[in-house]
Image (spheres, grey):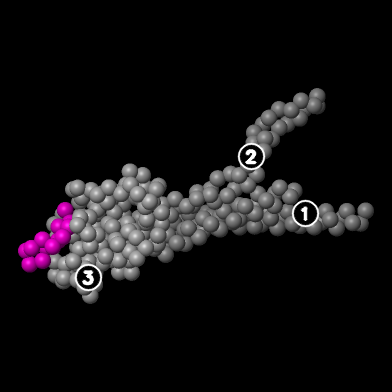
């Protein structure tokens, strides 16, 4: 009976984590370059179930999970839809790769290419830092720029820099550092021939309809666990009350 409390309690905690992840995804549907998060659950400890016959012989019939836990949150790095903005400081990577931004606490990587120009004329991602080029931070001096599909930036016909695009052999090594931002302990490789769309941004890869469906499913699972937990509590309460009367 007590085992049931553990199983149902862990189920409620897991579904709560799942709902939190879904809520975060829905809140970032319109965030450029955002990658949806997916909470994965696993079982913690299994117990073998056996049937005992009239002769006292046991016959294993399967196993039962002792508890379910939300063990990790995975980032889904599929490409979002590209949206034309007609804004000269917007960029999107076609295919694999990340922009690099020089932040206060080191370099962060992102698919968000909605850049601006700071007071010193550097290309920046607002709130994050300066955009890295192949030769360091890119100083354009103005927002009146042109760009080609390789990320070369020009002002008045003169090339002033090239946006650097980095890739990783294993995206699982990336760590979330904010919405759509990632850090890496190493392994960043600069791509030689990236495909960059100008006056375009990459939207999030969140499917709002699918997320709503997932939210309804998780909510129902949470309610089922809650109702079953109440039944366990009532049964135990009745048992304690009746035993006291004996």
C-alpha separation, residue under disc 1 versus residue under disc 2 = 25 Å
The residue mark sitting in front, 1 or 3, is 3
Visible residue check, residue 29: no
Neighbour class for label 3 at 10 Å: few (<14), some, many (≥20)?
many
Which badge, 1 or 3, comes first in the chain's sequence?
3
C-alpha separation, residue under disc 1 versus residue under disc 3 = 66 Å
The x and y percentages for residue 42 are 55, 45
The residue that appears at 73% across and 54% down in the rendered structure is: 232
The residue that appears at 16% across and 70% down in the rendered structure is: 141
Indicate which disc residue 46 carries. 2
Neighbour class for label 1 at 10 Å: few (<14), some, many (≥20)?
few
The residue mark sitting in front, 2 or 3, is 3
The x and y percentages for residue 9 are 65, 54
Neighbour class for label 2 at 10 Å: few (<14), some, many (≥20)?
few
Indicate which disc residue 117 carries. 3
Please identify the dominant SS of the magenta region: strand
In the rendered structure, which segment of residues is drawn in magenta? 150-162
The x and y percentages for residue 111 are 30, 57
**Side of 35 where 233 appears, left or right:** right
C-alpha separation, residue under disc 2 versus residue under disc 3 = 57 Å
Visible residue check, residue 238: yes
The residue that appears at 20% across and 55% down in the rendered structure is: 134
For disc 1, the marked residue is 235
Q: Are marks 1 and 3 in contact (CB under 8 Å)?
A: no
In this view, the residue farthest toward the right is 246
């Amino acid at each position: 009976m007590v085992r049931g409390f553990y199983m149902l309690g862990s189920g409620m905690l897991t579904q709560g984590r799942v709902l939190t992840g879904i809520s975060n995804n829905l809140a970032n549907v319109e965030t450029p370059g955002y990658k949806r998060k997916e909470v994965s659950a696993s079982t913690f400890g299994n117990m073998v179930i056996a049937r005992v016959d009239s002769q006292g012989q046991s016959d294993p019939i399967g196993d039962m999970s002792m508890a379910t836990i939300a063990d990790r949150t995975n980032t889904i790095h599929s490409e979002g839809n590209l949206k034309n903005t007609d804004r000269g400081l917007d960029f999107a990577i076609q295919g694999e790769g990340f922009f690099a931004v020089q932040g206060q606490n080191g370099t962060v990587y992102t698919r968000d290419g909605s850049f601006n120009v700071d007071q010193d004329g550097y290309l920046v991602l607002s709130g994050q830092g300066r955009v890295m080029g192949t030769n360091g931070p890119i100083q354009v001096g103005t927002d009146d720029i042109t760009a080609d599909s390789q990320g070369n930036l020009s002002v008045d016909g003169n090339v002033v820099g090239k946006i650097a695009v980095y890739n990783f052999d294993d995206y699982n090594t990336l760590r979330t550092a904010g919405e759509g931002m990632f850090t890496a302990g190493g392994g960043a490789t600069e791509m030689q021939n990236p495909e960059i769309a100008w006056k375009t941004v990459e939207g999030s890869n969140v499917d709002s309809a699918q997320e709503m469906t997932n939210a309804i499913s998780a909510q129902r699972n949470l309610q089922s666990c809650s109702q079953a937990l109440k039944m366990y509590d009532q049964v135990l309460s009745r048992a304690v009350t009746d035993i006291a009367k004996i």
